[in-house]
Amino acid sequence: MKTKVSLAFCLAALLAFTAQAVAHDYWAEAKDPKANQKLTAFLGYGHNFPDGEEIKPDSFSGRFQQPKVYSDAGELTLEPGVDNRHYLTVEKAAPGNYVVTTEINAAFSTRTKDGWESKPKNETKDPVKCSNYYRFGKEALVLGSAKYSGLAAKPLGQALEFVPQADPSKIKVGKPFPVKVIFKGQPLRGGEVSAYIAGLVEHNEALFFQSTTNQDGIVNIIPLKAGEWLAKVSVEEPYSDAKVCDVVNYTASYTFKVTN
C-alpha cells in the first residue's frame, strides 16, 4: 500500500492539482457542536471547504437531500436552520455519539464540445463523456463527556461510505487514523483515498494525504496538521445503457477534525 503525505507551500503545478481536488466537493458536517445544545447539521457543497457555496432552493426539488443525524438511540428529528444548508436537531444533543450524513440524488452531467450540460448524453449535442453521479457525505463525533460507543464504526448503508475504525474524536497530528471504505456493502479494495485540510486553496498551502485501501478496504489517514479535514474516495462503473450515459460515478467524503 503506497502512501503519500505532503506539507509544503506549492509551486504552480501542485496548486493546479489541489484546485482540481477541491472542485465541487460535497460533505456533511456538524457546525460548532456542543453538548446540551441543538446540533447543527450542515450540507456542504462547492470549492471552499468548510464554508461551501450557496445552494439555490429549487435544487432541493430533485437533487440535494436534507442532512440526517443519528445517535445510539436512532435518527434524530431536524428542523430548518438559518438557510437551506443548515438544519438543527429539534431536541438538544445530550453528551453522546453522533453521525451526520447527507447525499445527492443521482444526476447526469455530460461534457460536450461546447461545455457541460446536466442531461444524459442522448439529450445533448456532440457529447464527449457522460457521468451519472452520486455523492455522499458523513461525519462522526463524540459530544461532551461521553465515551466512544462504536457508533461511527457501524455502516449506515450508503452506496459508497467511509466507516471509521477508531474513536473519531481523538484524531491526532501525525498519528494513523484508520477508516474503512465500503462500496455496495463490500470492502473497497485499492480505492484511492485523498484528504486535505480547510484553507488549502485560500492560503496557497498544499497539505494533503493520498493512499489506497488494502484488501480489507482499510486505509490509515495520517494528517500532518491540526484543523478541519475532508477525505474523499471515488468509484466508477459502466452505465447500464451506453446510449444514455457512459459511467456511473460514486464519490463519498468524510469530514473530521484533528487535534494536536
Image: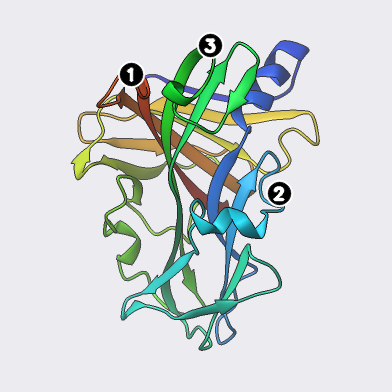
Q: Is residue 65 left or right of residue 56?
A: left
- State the CA–CA distance, disc 1 to disc 2: 33 Å
Nearer to us in this view, 221 or 74: 74
Please, what is the three-letter code of the amino acid marked with disc 3? Asp
SS for callout 2? loop
Counting residues from the start of the chain, the first of labels 1 and 2 encountered is 2
Identified at 77% across, 13% down, the residue is: 12
Q: Is residue 18 left or right of residue 127?
A: right
Q: Place residue 84 in its image quadrant.
A: bottom right
Nearer mark to the viewer, of 2 and 3? 3
**The one of 193 and 259 positioned closer to us in this rendering:** 193
Nearest to the observer: residue 115 or residue 199: 115
Q: Position of residue 130 (x, y in %)?
A: 45, 22
Q: Nearer the viewer, mark 1 or mark 2?
A: 1
**CA–CA distance in space, label 1 to label 3:** 13 Å
Residue 127 left/right relative to 45: left
Is residue 26 positioned above or below 67 on the image?
above
Residue hosting label 2: 53
Secondary structure beneath dot 3 equals loop
- The amino acid type of the residue labelled 2 equals Glu
Please tell me which of labels 1 and 3 falls first in the chain.
Answer: 3
* Quadrant of the drawing holding the N terminus: top left
Q: Can residue 5 be seen? A: yes
Q: Position of residue 199 (x, y in %)?
A: 73, 41
222 w.r.t. 131: above or below:
below
How packed is label 1: few (under 14 Cα within 10 Å), some, or many (20 or more)?
few
Please give the label number shown on residue 126. 3
Q: Amino acid at mark 1?
A: Lys
In the picture, measured across the screen, residue 12 lies left or right of residue 117, that is: right
User: What residue sits right under mark 1 in the picture?
Assistant: 243
